[in-house]
Image (cartoon, rainbow, N blue to C red):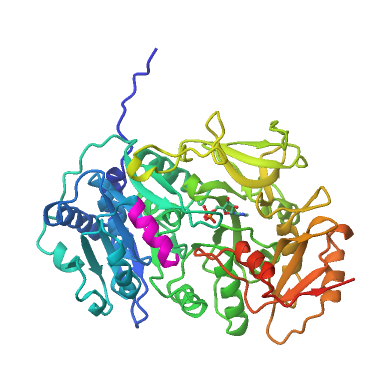
Amino acid sequence: MLSTMQDVPLLISRILAHGSTIHGDSQVTTWTGEAEPHRRSFAEIGVRAARLAHALRDALGVQQDERVATLMWNNSEHVEAYFAIPSMGAVLHTLNLRLPAEQLVFIVNHAADRVVLVNGTLLPLLAPLLPHLPTVEHVVVVGVGDRSALEGLDVRVHEYEELLEGRPGHYDWPELDERQAAAMCYTSGTTGEPKGVVYSHRSVYLHSMQVNMTESMGLTDHDTSLIVVPQFHVNAWGLPHATFMTGINMLMPDRFLQPAPLAEMIEREKPTHAAAVPTIWQGLLAEVTANPRDLTSMKHVTIGGAACPPSLMEAYDKLGVRLCHAWGMTETSPLGTMAHPPAGLTAEEEWPYRITQGRFPAGVEARLIGPAGDVLPWDGESAGELEVRGNWIAAAYYGGASGEPLRPEDKFSADGWLKTGDVGVISADGFLTLTDRAKDVIKSGGEWISSVELENALMAHPEVAEAAVVAVPDEKWGERPLATVVLKEGATADFAGLRAFLAQSIAKWQLPERWTIVETVPKTSVGKFDKKVIRKQYADGDLDVTTLA
Ligand code: ADP
């Protein structure tokens, strides 16, 4: 028997209509580096999104399903693009501005983007690529920045504000199929070639509702969220869409992502929430340690994308800011878990929960698969590869011109679950603890050593600023850990001392023999430790390694 309920397609245009009317007074504040930031209301964004859609359709001829790319910082115009492009039936393709040129070229060609919206300050990045992007016909330049890099190139150039001017502030958004493509993001390629994940209107809608639940980010129109996580990194973790559902104000850093302006933004604009990867919070911590600032407006902070060292959480606790750990992937929209401890616990009892990756929400089913392909129990001890499924989890990758979605066997199980490539354990009450990426696990004499556990323990040392641990080949054991350490300013290297410190919490056989001091840990385009690069540096003999007896 079928239900008697209405079935209204879950469309991004509905989120836009809701936010720009019911929450029309909420604001997007964009940092400009000048005395006053730029402020635009959700109502104005609604009008401008309609104008943008008219411009794309009538002036640039954008049709349903065509890909419109953005190469932009986090700012209010990028929010306009987030709503206008999917709502009109086209596909928003956010480009990661930190990718190497050849990867950007690969991605734009693979997606066959026809239009690129680009911040003027990023033209020096885009212009040299354009001769290699045959599908790109139009470049729309947004905001400040020197335009001269585009001179002489075979592409039609438009000014964003001129394009919008005089166009109607209302658009009859089409009634699309909710399963239609709304947006796409390519994985940042930490492990292998970038792969395109295509989100549907439905998946974005459902994901946004989950982001807004109290067991996730739980924000309202009383809040302001400092969205540091780039809009090109998994839709800024779903925040721009979620904000239009509940009226959360957005504080956007544009290109001012360095620790000092971030600290200033927080002190002046007093966001109640923020979201970013651990690297950003490490940098901000060093900044406010040197130049104290009041960060306490931030009631909580969503930290994820890479393991959050417990020592970082402790340091922010002392500053009156609570970091809440989350796990996710490009393939999971990204919200997979969040670490809110169960009710009724003391701070001390909460701690073991806070340092996990967190609990799965109702929309994400999880299972752990053991080495023999068996499903493992949730006992907090049995370690296996995490697989997930749900309505905002990818079922395949974009196949490009072939039109056929790609379902590589190492990424999708025969029964349709996403293989995350992450290894960990799940407790009986559903808290996930990740020990490693399958590719980063150190396999020493048949036993597994967790690189993340060693890193967390090292970063708890008062003289260590950052530490990354990778597997390196070893004649006797197959693989052994190599510790690469960034010292805090003024500290001196004492490997034996560091190893003794580790021995307080780590089993003796897991302690690294090989040590090296580096100036910085190499990072990926979204600010994660780039272990591929470290392994290569070691293999090429580029690191000055000390081996302890
Ligand atoms: P890429 O795979 O290119 O790095 P993603 O942003 O999709 O791009 O990365 C997803 C991966 O990031 C996860 O599979 C996991 O390995 C890692 N990750 C994300 N959040 C966490 C977390 N809280 N703790 C540990 N690892 C995390």
In the image, 271 versus 119, the foreground residue is 119
Indicate the position of residue 121 as horizontal and vertical percent values.
32, 75
Left or right of residue 243: residue 427:
right
- Residue plotted at (87% across, 70% down): 500
Tell me residue 485's x, y (percent): 71, 73
Determine whether 20 is above or below 541 in the image. Answer: above
Residue 186 percent across, percent down from the top left: 43, 53
Residue sitting farthest toward the top: 1
Q: Is residue 234 visible to the viewer in this orientation of the structure?
A: yes
From which residue to which does the magenta span run? 94-110
Q: Position of residue 68 (x, y in %)?
A: 27, 54
Q: Is residue 54 magenta?
A: no
Where the N terminus falls, by quadrant? top left
Query: In the drawing, does residue 386 fall left or right of residue 97?
Result: right
Q: Nearer the viewer, residue 514 or 350?
A: 514
Whether residue 40 is visible here, answered yes or no, is no
Q: Was residue 101 drawn as part of the magenta stretch in this picture?
A: yes
Q: Is residue 492 above or below residue 116?
A: below
Tell me what residue is drawn at x 37 percent, y 18 percent: 3
Of residue 219 and residue 47, the one placed in the foreground of this image is 47
Determine the image quadrant of residue 77.
bottom left
Residue drawn at point x = 23 percent, y = 74 percent: 150
Q: Is residue 280 shown above or below 307?
A: below
Residue 429 placement, left or right of 271? right
